[in-house]
């Protein structure tokens, strides 16, 4: 839900910035250049704030299971390593040790995921 709010804010900022720029251009006959230029600059800044997703800085990420997420990111790297070792092995390289080591690391990672599941960030484990 908060992701949708952040996305909506980013879209609104971008739209508002574009609207301010168009307004400064359309009202160029009645505005002086000293007013028109800063107005267009404000529009560009609003548009960039939306495009670059600056609402994420205002509304920070509130993930609760960060340790599990980090372990998930780690296993994705291990999947890449395993695939690279398997491809090299298929091409005749001697990477059986690397393949088996990576596979063992993946098994350990899955065990860590089981321990980290439902543990919120910052909470301590009771097992040693």
Image (spheres, helix red, strand yellow):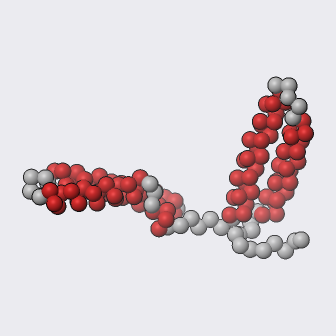
Let me know if residue 18 appears in the view: yes
Of all residues, the one furthest to the left in this rendering is 30
Q: Which one is nearer the viewer's eye here, 41 or 14?
A: 41
In the displayed structure, would residue 64 be above or below residue 31?
A: below
Marker count (numbered): 0
In the displayed structure, would residue 45 be above or below residue 77?
A: below
The answer to whether 101 appears left or right of 62 in the picture is: right
Q: Residue at x 62, y 65 (%)?
A: 63
Q: Which one is nearer the viewer's eye here, 124 or 34?
A: 34
User: Whole-percent x and y of residue 115?
Assistant: 82, 63
The answer to whether 54 appears left or right of 79 in the picture is: left
Q: Residue at x 73, y 47 (%)?
A: 77
Of all residues, the one furthest to the top in this rendering is 91
Q: Quadrant location of residue 103?
A: top right
User: Whole-percent x and y of residue 62?
Assistant: 59, 67
Q: Residue at x 45, y 57 (%)?
A: 53
Q: Quadrant of the C terminus?
A: bottom right
Q: Quadrant location of residue 47?
A: bottom left
Of all residues, the one furthest to the front in this rendering is 34
Q: Residue at x 69, y 58 (%)?
A: 69
Q: Quadrant location of residue 30?
A: bottom left
User: Whole-percent x and y of residue 35?
Assistant: 17, 61
Let me know if residue 5 appears in the view: no
User: Whole-percent x and y of residue 18?
Assistant: 29, 52
The answer to whether 21 appears left or right of 70 in the picture is: left
Q: Which one is nearer the viewer's eye here, 98 or 27?
A: 98
């Amino acid at each position: 839900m908060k992701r949708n709010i952040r996305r909506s804010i980013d879209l609104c900022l971008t739209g508002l910035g574009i609207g301010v720029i168009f307004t400064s251009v359309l009202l160029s006959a009645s505005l002086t250049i000293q007013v028109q230029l800063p107005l267009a600059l404000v529009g560009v800044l609003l548009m960039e704030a939306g495009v670059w997703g600056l609402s994420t800085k205002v509304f920070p990420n509130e993930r609760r299971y960060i340790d599990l997420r980090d372990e998930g990111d780690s296993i994705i790297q291990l999947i890449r390593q395993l695939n690279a070792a398997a491809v090299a092995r298929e091409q005749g390289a001697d990477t059986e040790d690397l393949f088996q080591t990576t596979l063992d690391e993946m098994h350990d990672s899955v065990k860590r995921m089981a321990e980290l599941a439902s543990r919120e960030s910052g909470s301590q484990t009771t097992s040693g």
